[in-house]
Image (cartoon, rainbow, N blue to C red):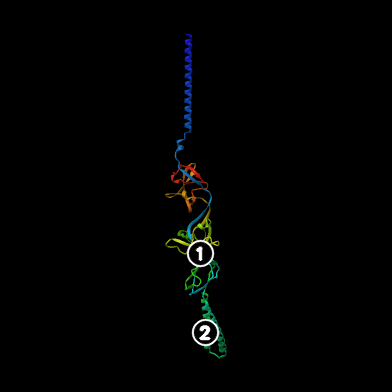
């Protein structure tokens, strides 16, 4: 009986211990689940932070120098150019240049047959000597009354006529020599030694490349700002990134009625002969420079009814700011009112931005 009671108590005690362990374990599990749920709740992002915000880029306004310039295209022209031709008919007896050679002013390039003209000059000079003696004798006789005034005048007229013939023949003789009218580079010759040429026959071209002229046109609205001495910048693929300078030296006195543009010419040094006539160049005309100005990219400017505006970035918000503009460049525009140095202006992603709405700043410079 006693043994049975002891066994019963042992079984009950064992069950109590088991139930206690189970209850304790169940509490731990619930506690762990609660902690995990709490942690998950803490780590879950705020719905307001997950919402999609427009991504934008912005620029900080700084002091800068505004360059008022326009860009046009132009054509290179030689400083001087001439097509040398024959003035008289005759056979070429000597060619004294090499194609592509640089020659000086007055250099003899081509000589033509001048034998006949030289003989005429010699004959006329001999006759002049004879008539000079006759004129001397007639003048002495006239002084003594031994000859009439008419007789003296006839001899003098004949002498003067012979002298005129000499000058005429010498002028024709000079035409048998073709000389360079200025220093330059000769081109490709179009005749050979021994060729017979007629008046107007082209011999060779001569081009001065030490300086070049640039001809270009500017829109009518800029005509009042183009002056002699204005500096322009010249760019060309041939220059491989180098920029050359030229100065305006001549302006057409009227606007082209067909194109509504003003034709201008500038002059530049080409002593190294990096450029050649006929080439195409890009031109930037500096109309003025304005230091300490506020300027923003033109893409940041938003036109609206009655004016223009920009979006200023302030504490995560896109704030609308009305502005007034000044000089417009190729990629920037001057702001005269509405912005200050240090303001942050949204420059990209503007189409997705709403006034006074939150934005996500992706990049700033």
Q: Earlier in the sequence, mark 1 or mark 2?
A: 1
Identify the residue shown where x is 51% and y is 64%: 78
Callout 2 environment at 10 Å: few (<14), some (14 to 19), or many (20+)? some
For residue 209, above or below residue 10:
below
Q: Is residue 356 left or right of residue 96?
A: left
Viewer can see residue 286: no
Q: Position of residue 290 (x, y in %)?
A: 52, 54
Under circle 1, the secondary element is strand
* Discs 1, 2 touching: Cβ within 8 Å: no
Viewer can see residue 56: yes
Residue 273 placement: quadrant: bottom right
Identify the residue shown where x is 52% and y is 84%: 158
Find the residue positioned furthest to the front.
Answer: 194
Q: Position of residue 251 (x, y in %)?
A: 49, 63
Find the residue positioned furthest to the bottom.
Answer: 146
Find the residue positioned furthest to the top.
Answer: 1
Callout 1 environment at 10 Å: few (<14), some (14 to 19), or many (20+)? some
Under circle 2, the secondary element is helix
Q: Position of residue 241 (x, y in %)?
A: 52, 55
Using the image, tell me which numbered label, if any, was put on residue 78: 1
Using the image, tell me which numbered label, if any, was put on residue 26: none
Residue carrying label 2: 158
For residue 178, above or below residue 274:
below
The residue closer to the viewer here, 270 or 100, is 100
């Amino acid at each position: 009986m006693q043994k049975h009671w002891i066994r019963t108590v042992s079984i009950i005690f064992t069950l109590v211990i088991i139930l206690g362990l189970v209850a304790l374990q169940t509490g731990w599990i619930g506690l762990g689940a609660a902690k995990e749920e709490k942690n998950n709740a803490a780590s879950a992002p705020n719905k307001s932070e997950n919402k999609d915000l427009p991504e934008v880029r912005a620029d900080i306004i700084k002091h800068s120098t505004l360059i008022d310039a326009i860009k046009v295209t132009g054509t290179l022209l030689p400083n001087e150019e001439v097509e040398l031709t024959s003035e008289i008919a005759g056979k070429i007896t000597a060619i004294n240049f090499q194609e592509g050679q640089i020659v000086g002013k007055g250099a003899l390039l081509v000589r033509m047959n001048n034998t006949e003209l030289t003989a005429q000059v010699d004959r006329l000079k001999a006759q002049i000597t004879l008539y000079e003696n006759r004129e001397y004798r007639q003048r002495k006789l006239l002084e003594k009354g031994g000859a009439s005034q008419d007789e003296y005048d006839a001899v003098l007229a004949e002498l003067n006529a012979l002298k005129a013939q000499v000058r005429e023949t010498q002028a024709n003789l000079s035409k048998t020599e073709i000389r360079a009218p200025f220093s330059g580079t000769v081109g490709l010759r179009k005749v050979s030694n021994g060729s017979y040429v007629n008046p107007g026959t082209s011999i060779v071209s001569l081009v001065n490349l030490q300086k070049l002229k640039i001809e270009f046109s500017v829109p009518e609205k800029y005509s009042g700002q183009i002056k002699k001495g204005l500096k322009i910048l010249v760019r060309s693929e041939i220059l491989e990134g180098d920029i050359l300078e030229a100065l305006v030296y001549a302006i057409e006195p009227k606007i082209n009625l067909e194109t509504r543009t003003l034709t201008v010419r500038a002059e530049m040094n080409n002593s190294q002969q990096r450029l050649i006539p006929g080439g195409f160049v890009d031109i930037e005309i500096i109309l003025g420079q304005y230091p300490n100005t506020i300027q923003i990219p033109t893409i940041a400017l938003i036109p609206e009814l009655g004016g223009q505006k920009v979006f200023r970035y302030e504490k995560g918000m896109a704030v609308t700011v009305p502005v007034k503009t000044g000089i417009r460049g190729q990629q920037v525009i001057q702001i005269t009112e509405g912005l200050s140095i240090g303001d942050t202006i949204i420059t990209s992603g503007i189409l997705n931005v709403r006034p006074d709405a939150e934005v996500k700043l992706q990049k700033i410079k």
